[in-house]
Amino acid sequence: MKKAVLLCAIAAAWPGASHAKPGPRMICEGVMDTGSGMAGSTLGDCSFRADSDPERLVQSVCEQGATCRVEAIGRPGHRGEVSKVLSVRQLAMPRSNKASYLEDVAGRLDGILAPAAAGCDNPQDTPADRVSVLLDGLGGSAIQIHGRYCAITSGSGDPVRDAGFQAVLRGNCAAVGAPDAELRTGRAGEKSEIVVAVQGSGPVKINGEALVRCPIRQRYVAKWWIDGNHTFRGRYPQ
């Protein structure tokens, strides 16, 4: 889940700040990087003095290596340096955690699903009538939700447990047929968040739609799903 904190009023950390001309409003967005010793921290084009109140506040919400967004007031005369934090949000987990979390979710979610109201056995159904999930594919994590294909680039949420969990998967989505590589770099599609709820029993919900798991059969499995699955190595299971 996204972590966020909003601050209505925080005293500036620097001596004499009350007598100084107010600094500029700043938007900092990027990867959180905290140096050692007195190096301080950086986030996008913004910097934070080591052991300062603004640095401690941002670190309390934004993990090292995570992608975050901070609204702040700059320190006059010190380009890019933050003197006061107005809000901070963690937008995406660190890269090292994103892969492991998607792998955990893949173990509970990968497969072919159909709308619970329709079921799995309609012979006229095509891949577009179902939801195809492959978060552990060789070509990268992806989901086809009926007529839309999404290249998944990150995910966060509850710990993956047998009793159930909720996760938010983020990536770029477009109509089926858009090049995967273009979606992964953001040159195509639109940024999207996909909310997944997996219960211990009962249907899976993706963006609120109740879905049931289906057998994997050639007539309704999307070709990209088979090609990207290291288990079947391009062969359709019977």
Image: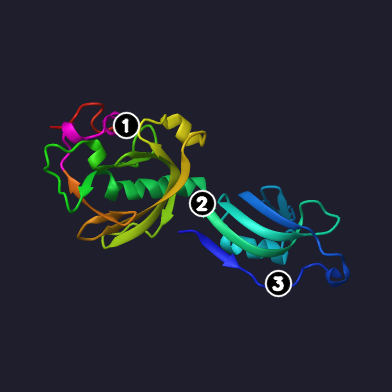
Given the image, on which type of amino acid does mark 3 rest? Ile
Residue 127 spot, x, y in % from top left: 24, 36
Residue with the mark numbered 1: 228
Left/right placement of residue 96 relative to residue 42 reads left
Q: Write down the region rendered in magenta.
A: 215-228
Is disc 3 in contact with disc 2, using a CB cutoff of under 8 Å?
Answer: no
| Residue 154 shows in the view | no
Q: Which comes before the other along the chain, label 2 or label 1?
A: 2
| Residue 109 shows in the view | yes
How far apart in space, not on screen, are marks 2 and 1 (Cα)?
Answer: 25 Å
In the image, residue 223 lies in the stretch drawn in magenta = yes
Q: Is mark 2 on a helix, strand or loop?
A: strand
Left/right placement of residue 181 relative to residue 124 reads right
Q: In which quarter of the image is residue 161?
A: bottom left
Residue with the mark numbered 3: 10
Residue 123 spot, x, y in % from top left: 11, 37
How far apart in space, not on screen, are marks 3 and 1 (Cα)?
Answer: 50 Å
Residue with the mark numbered 2: 92
Looking at the picture, does residue 28 appear above or below residue 224? below
Is disc 2 in contact with disc 1, using a CB cutoff of under 8 Å?
Answer: no
Residue 83 spot, x, y in % from top left: 76, 62
Q: Residue at x 19, y 48 (%)?
A: 213
Looking at the picture, does residue 53 appear above or below residue 146? below
- The extreme top residue here reads 234
